[in-house]
Image (cartoon, grey):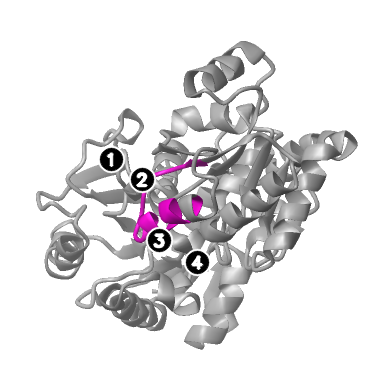
Amino acid sequence: MSLRRAPARVGINAQKLSTRQSYHAAGSSRYVYSLLRELRAIEPTESIVAYLGDVDPPSDLAPTERFTPRRATWPTFRPSVRIAWEQLVLPRWLHHDRVTLLHGPVNALPVAWRGPSVVTILDLTFMLLPEAFNRANRLYLRWMVAFAAARADRIIAISEATRRDVIARLRVPPERIQRIYCGVEREFRPIEDGHDLRGLREKWGLGEGFILYLGTIEPRKNLIRLIDAYAELRRRKATDRTLVLAGGRGWGDEMIVRRAHEAGVDEHVRFVGFVPEHEMPLWYNAADLFVYPSEYEGFGLPPLEALACGTPVVASNRSSLPEVVGEAGVLVDPTDTAAMADAMQRVLEDERLQSRLSKAGPEQARPFTWRRMAEETLGVYRAVSERA
């Protein structure tokens, strides 16, 4: 007669969850938050211990019988402090809390942890676009992701493109890595009432419409070429719409501001700063066109959210973005500025194309849900625990 195995006690390193009004609350933070929220809501037989940074957890991460948030007292929003806490303090907390499985949801694991583990690799941007990172950050990320990929019992990649990159770049056997897509919140949907949309445009002086990019403001998002493509549209007199660059400012953002001035369009480019998640659906819906020209993305939440809102999308044809956008948007070579300008002009001028894309977007986005992501991640926990 075999003894029944006790449910796992899963520790999740949630240091990247941020409530700060900055780029820190972008993609990786939203991934971690959505994972925790959905696991808590599922109420699995497993116990979940979420190791948060020095932040006040939102109400939907309050403790339950099987969900325990624990806060670090160190200022782990600082990268160097976070790394030190993960390596020096977290292993002791895991031991104290009798954790049987550790999940590192953002590319990292503590060296001292010897138990079963899962790591999510969000992207390999620091390897594929090394010029977009300072040297110290790049070297740490390369070493840590290689260590985590070698140490983890199972790896989660958030797109098929990232899965292929991990297999090729980190020499991970395909059977050790599973693709689990990110999701989109239900709040991202078409807004029928035009009153709020007009109010947003009037508040920001955006006239009857605008072209939108939403994401971190940094060179690795290919925003310099986007500004050049926009300047080409203005030279062609193909649009008089404002280009809105929305999002928290990241490393090297001054180069983007300078490029708008050099291209002679600084009066027509608006930097509106960080946009809280609850305001994002309004921005997507108010825009005539959403453009996402990034050369590399582990997944690409913003174009998925724009699709869900029914906003026409022009996006890069690189990395994971074709998986996310499918045939519901216009894909373009992100290194070809003229082609980017052509694609933007085509969508802005072709009303039939606009209508088709607006209808196709929500259908494309529908299968991507955070609940599905959490359920599939829970399946990975169980598979690893059964083999432990």
Please tell me whether mark 4 sits on a helix, a strand or a loop: strand
Asked if marks 1 and 2 touch (Cβ < 8 Å), the reply is yes
Counting from the top left corner in percent of width and height, residue 268 is at 55, 38
Q: CA distance from mark 1 to mark 4?
A: 26 Å
Q: Is residue 367 visible?
A: no
Q: CA distance from mark 4 to mark 2?
A: 21 Å
Q: Is residue 203 above or below residue 33?
A: above
Q: Earlier in the sequence, mark 4 or mark 3?
A: 3
Q: Over which residues does the magenta segment extend? A: 245-260
Q: Identify residue type, mark 3.
A: Arg
Please tell me whether mark 3 sits on a helix, a strand or a loop: loop
Q: Earlier in the sequence, mark 1 or mark 4?
A: 1
Q: Nearer the viewer, residue 69 or 2?
A: 69
Q: Of discs 4 and 2, which sits in the foreground? A: 2
Q: Is residue 301 visible?
A: yes
Q: Nearer the viewer, residue 285 or 158?
A: 285
Counting from the top left corner in percent of width and height, residue 107 is at 38, 68
Q: Identify residue type, mark 4.
A: Ile
Asked if marks 1 and 4 touch (Cβ < 8 Å), the reply is no
Query: At 40% from the left edge and 68% from the top edge, which residue is drawn?
Result: 118
Please tell me whether mark 1 sits on a helix, a strand or a loop: loop
Asked if marks 1 and 3 touch (Cβ < 8 Å), the reply is no
Residue beneath label 1, please? 20
Counting from the top left corner in percent of width and height, residue 125 is at 47, 71
Query: At 49% from the left edge and 24% from the top edge, which residue is drawn?
Result: 204
Q: CA distance from mark 1 to mark 2?
A: 6 Å
Taking the image as shown, residue 277 lies to the left or right of residue 291, namely left
Residue beneath label 4, please? 156
Q: Earlier in the sequence, mark 1 or mark 3?
A: 3
Determine which of the numbered discs, if any, sits on residue 25 in the image: 2
Residue beneath label 3, please? 4
Quadrant of the image containing the N terminus: bottom left
